[in-house]
Image: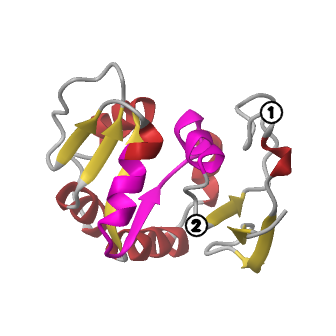
Amino acid sequence: MAWAGPYFGAGSAAHSLAVLEGSDAFLMGRRTYEIFARQWPAATGPYADALNRMPKYVFSSTLVDAEWNNTTVIPGDVAEGVQALKDAGGKDLVVYGHGRFGQTLVDAGLVDELTLTVVPVFVPSGMPLFRDGSEQLRWDLVRAGQGDDPGLASLTYRPRDSF
């Protein structure tokens, strides 16, 4: 995601820190874990410190042990594992990016809010936001506005109760 780097500035950093501080845990799939676990354990600063100390859950059928501190590997059914974390109550659970893990959460109806940051860069390939068959999902736009740095837009959606 190097293409987003030039748009990520102090505003986005402050917003990202506020999201972490308002969350009980960070959820991710194995691929995101591998990327984050290479970068963040050795990083310093307010964001890195918050990310490193918070509970993290990686959902994977192939990863057995997580070396990144405060990380628990949850094997098995993703929807059941996430639902158990949601049922425990507390603050928000945060997910960054939206790969197969995010698609699984959307398909299972486990996403309470979806915030998209629009970066004005066209990328020639990548993963679609939703999988085929997700067209029956309906989302209501609850917030729209400028992003936290120049050139960005922020759109927040919540799932519609009825189709």
Query: What color scheme is it?
Result: secondary structure
* Residue 91 falls within the magenta-colored stretch: yes
Q: In this rendering, would 117 be left or right of 82?
A: right
User: Crowding near pointer 2: few (<14 within 10 Å), some, many (20+)?
Assistant: few
Q: In this rendering, would 146 be left or right of 114?
A: right
Q: CA distance from mark 2 to mark 1?
A: 20 Å
| Residue at which label 1 appears | 132
Camera-side residue of 61 and 27: 61
Camera-side residue of 98 and 131: 131
Position of residue 107 measured from the top left corner of the image (x, y, whole percent): 65, 44
User: Crowding near pointer 1: few (<14 within 10 Å), some, many (20+)?
Assistant: few
Residue occupying the point 41% across, 77% down: 18
The secondary structure type at the circle numbered 2 is loop
Position of residue 61 measured from the top left corner of the image (x, y, whole percent): 36, 23
Residue occupying the point 73% across, 70% down: 161
Position of residue 126 measured from the top left corner of the image (x, y, whole percent): 72, 30
Pick out the residue farthest to the top. 62
* Residue 1 falls within the magenta-colored stretch: no
Q: Please say if 4 is above or below 78.
A: below
| Residue at which label 2 appears | 112
In primary-sequence order, the first of circles 2 and 1 is 2
Q: Please say if 93 is above or below 66.
A: below
The amino acid pointed to by label 2 is Asp
Number of marks drawn: 2
The amino acid pointed to by label 1 is Asp
Position of residue 163 measured from the top left corner of the image (x, y, whole percent): 85, 62
Q: Which residues are magenta?
A: 81-108
